[in-house]
């Protein structure tokens, strides 16, 4: 049964939305015209997936993972009037201002974008002699100012909180290895200035079934009256390879390294054809949400099969009730 938990955030009356199909029993449902971004929306693209959208000037902007036809992993900026039909820049983002050593990265993938205080911060999986967390900020989705990498390699899935926790900025991440990382748990780190990161805390570990091999944070945490709502991906190793699903948990509002509730069942697993068939079969990988606080609506952007971008929907009440009803600490 849904309770009355709410999002602590802004109104977004133009959030992309479709009601849950009649008779559908699960708390997260797919947009019926998925995928919203085909793999070849721009000429240079092999695939467009694992990408981030935010509200911007009454419409929407985003940072997109575009793997090009040389199979380089690049970030491109994009705009949309409705959050569904996107115009993606044909050229990759040019990052400005980094120290030479930091600017030498060869890889840019799995971006997250979050508004903190007065600007948008982009985090992504960067390369510095191994995967690490790249950071940049933008105010206009045209110029992007690169900061220091957050961590030593190897780390992936750096996800900033949308506000300071206590007096410090906060980030979730997933220490990894140089390859396809057959392990991994979620950690929390703090920074006084978005440059020096420390006070690392363990948040949660992989466990059985759909999340038995590794887990990693997904979109930026959503502040609710029940705590920080996070969606995270979990990986199962089958005889045919990795299967990426996603689930949800609630973190303590003041000490977000403490898990208050965590659902045993996944929310979405690769079952639609475009999630099961592509460059990497059987992947749903969420990187962004849009939220509308008054209605409790949440739209989730996710990469499908490392090839295209999908959209899914849920209601905050129903998700929190689901986490609590299926809570297995
Ligand atoms: C992860 C990342 C993601 C990708 C996923 C499935 O390790 O590389 O970009 O979507 O694997 O291949």
Image (tube, rainbow, N blue to C red):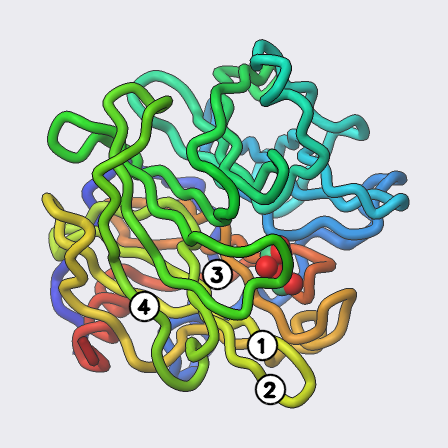
10 Å crowding of disc 4: few (<14), some (14-19), many (20+): some
Query: Ligand 1 within 8 A of label 2's CB?
Result: no
Occupied quadrant, residue 181: bottom right
**Which type of secondary structure does the marked residue at label 1 adopt?**
strand
In-front residue for pair 237/5: 237
Can residue 91 be seen by looking at this rendering? yes
Real-space Cα distance between discs 2 and 1?
A: 7 Å
**Which type of secondary structure does the marked residue at label 3 adopt?**
loop
Q: Tell us which disc is closer to us: 1 or 3.
A: 1
- Compared with 269, 70 (above or below) is above
**Which type of secondary structure does the marked residue at label 2 adopt?**
strand
Residue bearing the label numbered 2: 238
Q: Given contact means CB atoms under 8 Å apart, are the residues at marks 4 and 1 in contact?
A: no
Q: Given contact means CB atoms under 8 Å apart, are the residues at marks 2 and 1 in contact?
A: yes
Q: Residue 315, percent across and down?
A: 31, 62
Q: Tell us which disc is closer to us: 2 or 1.
A: 2
Query: Ligand 1 within 8 A of label 1's CB?
Result: no
Q: Tell us which disc is closer to us: 3 or 2.
A: 2
**Where is the C terminus found, in terms of image quarters?**
bottom left
The residue sitting at 47% across, 75% down in the picture is 213
Q: Given contact means CB atoms under 8 Å apart, are the residues at marks 1 and 3 in contact?
A: no
Q: Given contact means CB atoms under 8 Å apart, are the residues at marks 3 and 2 in contact?
A: no
* Relative to 77, 153 lies left or right: left
Rendered image: mark on residue 205: 4
The residue sitting at 40% across, 61% down in the picture is 232
Q: Residue 169, percent across and down?
A: 26, 30
Q: Ligand 1 falls in which quarter?
A: bottom right
Residue bearing the label numbered 3: 18
The residue sitting at 32% across, 68% down in the picture is 205
Rendered image: mark on residue 243: 1
Q: Given contact means CB atoms under 8 Å apart, are the residues at marks 4 and 2 in contact?
A: no
- Compared with 160, 321 (above or below) is below
């Amino acid at each position: 049964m849904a309770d009355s938990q709410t999002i602590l955030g802004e109104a977004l009356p133009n959030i992309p939305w479709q009601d849950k199909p009649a008779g559908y029993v699960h708390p997260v449902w797919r947009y019926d015209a998925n995928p919203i971004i085909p793999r070849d929306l721009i000429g240079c693209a092999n695939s467009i997936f694992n990408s981030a959208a935010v509200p911007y000037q009454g419409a929407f902007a985003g940072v997109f993972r575009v793997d090009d036809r040389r199979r380089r992993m690049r970030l491109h900026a994009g705009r949309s009037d409705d959050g569904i039909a996107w115009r993606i820049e044909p050229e990759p983002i040019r990052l400005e201002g980094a120290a030479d050593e930091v600017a030498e990265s060869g890889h840019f993938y799995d971006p997250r974008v979050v508004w903190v205080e007065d600007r948008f911060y982009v985090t992504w999986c960067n390369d510095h002699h191994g995967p690490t967390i790249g950071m940049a900020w933008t105010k206009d989705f045209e110029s992007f100012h690169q900061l220091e990498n957050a961590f030593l390699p190897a780390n992936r899935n750096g996800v900033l909180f949308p506000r300071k926790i206590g007096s410090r900025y906060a980030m979730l991440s997933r220490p990894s290895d140089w390859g396809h990382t057959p392990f991994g748990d979620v950690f929390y780190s703090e920074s006084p200035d978005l440059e020096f990161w420390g006070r690392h805390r363990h948040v949660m570990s992989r466990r059985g079934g759909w999340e038995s091999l590794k887990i990693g944070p997904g979109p930026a945490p959503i502040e609710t009256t029940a705590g920080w709502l996070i969606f995270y991906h979990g990986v199962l190793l089958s005889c045919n390879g990795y299967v990426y699903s996603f689930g949800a948990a609630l973190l303590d509002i003041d000490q977000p390294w403490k898990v208050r509730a965590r659902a045993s069942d996944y929310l979405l697993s690769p079952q639609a054809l475009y999630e099961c068939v592509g460059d990497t079969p059987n992947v749903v990988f969420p990187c962004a949400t849009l939220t509308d606080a008054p209605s409790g609506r949440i739209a989730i952007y996710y990469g499908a099969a490392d090839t295209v971008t999908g959209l899914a929907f849920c209601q905050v009440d129903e998700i929190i009730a689901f986490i609590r009803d299926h809570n297995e600490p």
